[in-house]
Image: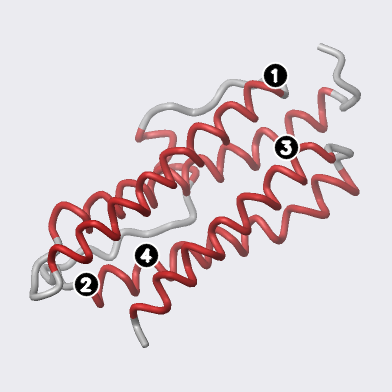
Amino acid sequence: MEIGITAANRSAVASELAKLLADETILYLKTKNAHWNIEGADFYEKHKFFEWQFAQLDEIIDSVAERMRAIGHYAPSNLKQYLSLTNLMDKSDDLNDSEKYIGELLSDHEKVFLFLRERIKLFADELHDIGSSDFITGLMKKHEKMAWFLRSHLK
């Protein structure tokens, strides 16, 4: 495969994208959990809000896997792989209120966009993959916006 990026660099990028895919998938599942299990006076509003968020994450997940395929690598595709790759933790407890869910999801989005921010220059400058650098810059902006929406609910 000749796309102007060495095989070693494509492999390094794919390895980082696999971690991202794991984080995105775990974040998606945690957002689905909030959507399904939210309780309280603000149930309907938050139920719809979490639905909007997990729909965005579904699109992001697909785009990350497709980027991996575009650079010649397979995407991890099972929970065992995701759990071994993710940087996110499950803080499950018995509370199903919106503040708890929003706080945990906000923290996870912040972890994801910090992970992305740290890799933008790595992909472009060291691994010579401008396309993947641009791709994750766009994802970082999406996570920043989703985090802003979550943060706004906590004020």
Crowdedness near tag 1: few (<14), some (14–19) or many (≥20) residues, C-alpha within 10 Å: some
Is 124 placed above or below 40 here? above
Describe the element under mark 1 as helix, strand or loop.
loop
Name the quarter where the N terminus is drawn: top right
Q: Are marks 4 and 1 in contact (CB under 8 Å)?
A: no
Q: Choose the circle earlier in sequence order: 4 or 2.
A: 2
Q: Which residue is mark 1?
A: 72
Is 37 placed above or below 76 here? below
Residue at 35% from the left image edge and 35% from the top image edge: 79
Q: Which residue is mark 3?
A: 13
- 4 or 2: mark nearer the eye: 2
- The amino acid type, in three-letter code, at marker 2 is Ser
The percent coordinates of residue 9 (x first, y second) are 82, 33
> As drawn, is 135 to the left or to the right of 60?
right
> Marks 3 and 4, how far apart in space?
26 Å
> Marks 1 and 2, how far apart in space?
41 Å
Q: Which residue is mark 4?
A: 105
Along the viewing direction, whichever of 103 and 75 lies nearer the viewer: 103
- The amino acid type, in three-letter code, at marker 3 is Val
The percent coordinates of residue 93 (x first, y second) are 16, 67
- The amino acid type, in three-letter code, at marker 1 is Gly
Q: Which residue is mark 2?
A: 98
Q: Quadrant of residue 74?
A: top right
